[in-house]
Image (tube, rainbow, N blue to C red):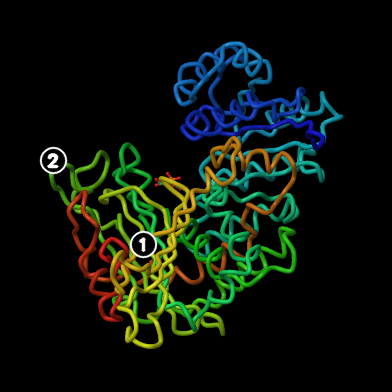
Amino acid sequence: MKPQTNFDLVLFGATGDLAMRKLLPALYQAHAAGLLHPQGRILGVSRSKFSREEFLAKVGRDSKIHIKNIEDAAWAQFEQRIDYLSLDVGEAADFSALADKVNQRPDTDAVVVYLSTAPKFFAPACEKLAAAGLNAPKVRIVLEKPLGTDLASCRKINEDVAAYFQENQIYRIDHYLGKEGLQNLLPLRFGNSLFEPLWNKDYIQSVQITIAETLGVEERGEFYDITGALRDMVQNHIVQMLCFTAMERPKSLAADDVRDEKLKVIQSLKPLNDIDKQAIRGQYAPSAGLNGYAQEHKVPVDSRTETYVAIKAEIDNPRWAGVPFYLRTGKRLAGRTAEIVLNFKPQPDDGKLYAAVPNRIVISLQPQETVRVRLAVKAVGSDRTVPAEMVLDLAQAAAGRRAEAYELLLREVIDGRLNLFNRRDELEAAWAWLTPVLEHWAASPVPPHLYPAGSHGVEAARAMLAENGDLWLEEQD
Ligand code: BG6
C-alpha cells in the first residue's frame, strides 16, 4: 500500500451547500474506508462566528443526512479531524490566525486549500494566503467551478491566482473527471487494440455526447438564471467528455501529457460560425404537472436563460474531419443519463449480403457504467440478421469499492496528482470556443425554443441531426 499523505485541508465556504452536501460526506467516506492519513486534519473556514462545537453541530445536522451507511464510531473519529476557524476574506489578521493554525503542524506533507466560494473571493483569498506565507510549494489550491462566465472573466481569475501560485499548485475541479466511466475511456481506447483502428472518420459516421437530467433547477434559480446550461454544463463537463472521446494517444499518463492532448482537441474545434444552425437553445415549459423554468423559484417570468443546449461541433484534424459531434444537455428531460454514442458507418456493400445493422458503441457514465456494442447476429432459423447488444458492465468487470466523484478528486488533490484537474489553457480554450455563442444569444431577438418538461428536448435539435440523416440515440432502433 502506498504511504498516505499527511495533510491539512482548509475548506473555505465550509458552511455552504457544496461543503455540506458533497465535500464533507466525501471526506467521511474516505475516512471510513481508511484512505486518509490518521493525522490528516480538516479545517472548516467561513465567515460565520461559530465555535468548533457549533460547526460540528451544523455538520451533524446538514451533512450527515447526505451520507449513506454511517457508522457511529467512525463518525466520532471523523469529527476528531475537524476544526473550525471564523475568517473574513477581507481581513489580513484572520489569515495570520489561519497560518498559525496550519503552522502548528509543520510536518504535514500537503496543505490543501479548497475554495468552495463564489469566484469573486478567489483573488483576495489567494493574495492574503500568500501574504500569510500560505503559498509554499506544499500548498495546493482547489478552485471550484464555475471558473468565469466567459473567456475574459476566466482569464482574469487565472491571472489573479497565478500571481500567487504556480500552475502545478492549482487544481481546477470538474467533477465529471472524477467519474470512473469517463476515466475508463482512455484504457478502453488505448489499452485495447480492438477499437482504436476504427476510432476515426473512416469508420465513424457521427458521435453524440449527452448529459440529460430529470431534475429542474430546484432551489438554484438565482444562480442558474445568470448561468444557463451552456456555462453550467457544456463549457466544462461536455467539453471534457468530448476530449476523452476524441483525443490522440498521450505520450504517457503524466498529467501534462494527457492535458496536452485534450487541449489539442479543444483548439481543433471549428469555430461555430452559423450559430443559429449549429447551437440550439431551449427552455422547459410547464407540462404534466411540472413547472416550466419561468415558474421556478427566483426565476424571472420573462427569463431567456437556456436550460437545454444542442450543438453540432466539428473537429478539424485528420482523425475527425467531417464527422459531426452532436453535444447536448438539458434539465427536466425524460431520463437521467450521461453517455457517449459512436455511430458507425454502414457496411460498404450497402446491405447486399445482410440487411444493414449499423454498429454502435454506447459508453454510459450514469445511471449505470456500461459499454454497449451493437452488432448484427443471425436470426434463429433464418439467414437474416437481427440487431443485438453486447453489454460490458464496468462495475461488475472491475470489482471494488467505487468512490463518488468528489471523494476521488479530494484524494487526488491530497496526493498531489493533477491528472483529473483542468489546466488553465484547456479552460480558456473552451471558453474561447463558446464565448461567441453566448454573445450571439445575448444579442439575439429570438428567445430559446420551449420544450415540454419531461420530454426529450427541443424539436429543432432533432431537425439539426435530420439534415445529416442522423437521429438521437432514443430514436435509433
Ligand atoms: C453540476 C451542475 O456541475 O453538475 C448542475 O452545476 C448539474 O446543474 C450537475 O445538475 C450534474 O452532475 P451529475 O454528476 O449529477 O451528472
Image location of residue 414, percent across then percent down: 71, 39
N-term mark: 1 or 2: 2
Q: Residue at x 57, y 75 (%)?
A: 267
Looking at the image, do the residues carrying marks 1 and 2 touch, with CB atoms under 8 Å apart?
no
Quarter of the figure with residue 374: bottom left
Q: Is residue 94 left or right of residue 466?
A: right
413 lies above or below 227: above
Q: Quadrant of the N terminus?
A: top right
Please name the amino acid that badge 2 sits on: Gly
Return the mark for residue 289.
2
Q: Quadrant of the C terminus?
A: bottom left
33 lies above or below 213: above
Q: Is residue 388 left or right of residue 163?
A: left
Mark 1 neighbour class, 10 Å CA radius: few under 14, some 14 to 19, many 20 or more = some
Q: Secondary structure at mark 1?
A: strand
Question: In 3D space, how far apart are the residues under numbered discs 1 and 2 (Cα atoms)?
Answer: 37 Å
| Residue indicated by mark 1 | 388
Please name the amino acid that badge 1 sits on: Ala
Image location of residue 55, percent across then percent down: 56, 18
Furthest-front residue in this view: 381
Q: Is residue 384 left or right of residue 320?
A: left
Return the mark for residue 249.
none
Q: Residue at x 33, y 66 (%)?
A: 387
